[in-house]
Amino acid sequence: MPTAVAAHLLVAECSDVRPFARLLRGIGLKHSAVLTITSAGFEVTVEEVRSLCATAWIPSNIFSAFTYAADAPACFEISLDALLLCLNIFGNAGSAGAGAGAGAGAGIKSKRRWAGEGDEADAADAAMSGASAGARRPGGGKTGMRMTWAGPGFPLGILLQDERGPTTSCELGTAEPEELMNQAFDDDNRAVYLIMKAEWFRDALVDLPPSCAKVTLDAVPRGTEPDPPPGATASSEARARKRGDNGSFAIHAEGDFGNVHFDYPNDKQIMDAFECAAYTSFSYNAVHISLLSRALQHATKICLQIEHTGFLCVQVMMPIPDDLPSDRHNGILEFKMNALDDDV
């Protein structure tokens, strides 16, 4: 490892690490991540056995100062688990907590330990000892951060300061990144495109049956003549005709003790955009779909796209401050996965 003092290629500063940590936590399904640095910000990517790819697009504007002094992007692997634990060293970076952990699996059971959660034993010990209670109390203040990197071969340096005074510094080792699948979405092969309020999608994931193995996504184009269900009332038939006239999007899941079905008409109160030229239906691994729950906790909208092959891309959009220019964003989380083979 180089030992000479080097000028920093990267300097990123913020007075509150919570927005940064929130974006990282949304893709924390793996403990290692590939970090790419450009002048526009960070791209942090994780993969689940080459079947699910999750990326956090973290723009430079969420930092009070951001400088990257190289022309070409830098890319290396880091411990996402260690980075999140460092950011929350004073207990002010927010935490997924029990409620969020349940959301990550929704009704679906999972033993997954998300990056940055730490060991349950460590959490229990800290709670019983009450050590540094004032400094470790979540929500007790803000933590400022200064992140630096001198270039290939050097660690990622992080200086953290609690607004009440204490400071600490951490160094995270970097490694050559593993090759990622990170399949690109083909806009020219797009079958479905919609933008809807995140809360509608989030509520559906929470109600997934614990035993379901797959989740089916359906899109019905405008002008479709619906088949009224048996025993349909006049009002339900009218709603079905409206969905057929305007188009709709639906989520289905089957469990051991029943099924769930969520229907979202192309209505301006639900959809910001809806494009679908032909009826489209694909199924996806229920565990992978449920992993979006954590990313949706603070989201305002989602952009969902499906290729004709069934390849799915869901972009989760974070709240945008009023003073942010319209051509910029405050962070986007992207999840991509292929449809189950039975539906291809």
Image (cartoon, rainbow, N blue to C red):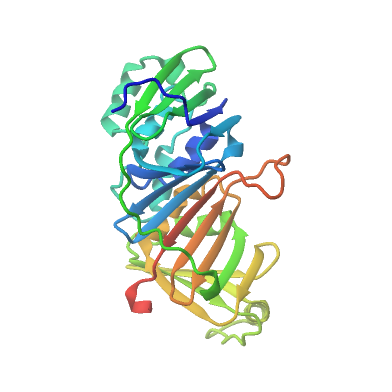
In the foreground, 126 or 276? 276
On the question of residue 1 being in view, the answer is: yes
Please provide percent x and percent y for residue 91.
44, 25
The number of discs equals: 0
Determine the residue positioned at 43% across, 76% down. 309
In the foreground, 189 or 286? 189
Determine the residue positioned at 48% across, 36% down. 21
275 lies left or right of 158: right
User: From the viewer's perspective, is residue 332 above or below residue 321?
Assistant: below
In the foreground, 259 or 101? 101
On the question of residue 190 being in view, the answer is: no
User: From the viewer's perspective, is residue 252 above or below residue 126?
Assistant: below
Please provide percent x and percent y for residue 225.
62, 87
User: From the viewer's perspective, is residue 70 above or below residue 161?
Assistant: below
144 lies left or right of 130: right
Please provide percent x and percent y for residue 86.
39, 28
In the foreground, 45 or 101? 45
Determine the residue positioned at 44% across, 69% down. 311
287 lies left or right of 90: left
| Residue 272 image-quadrant placement | bottom right
Determine the residue positioned at 54% across, 17% down. 163
Q: Quadrant of the C terminus?
A: bottom left
Please provide percent x and percent y for residue 185.
48, 65
Q: Quadrant of the N terminus?
A: top left
User: From the viewer's perspective, is residue 326 above or below residue 64?
Assistant: below
Residue found at the far left of this picture: 121
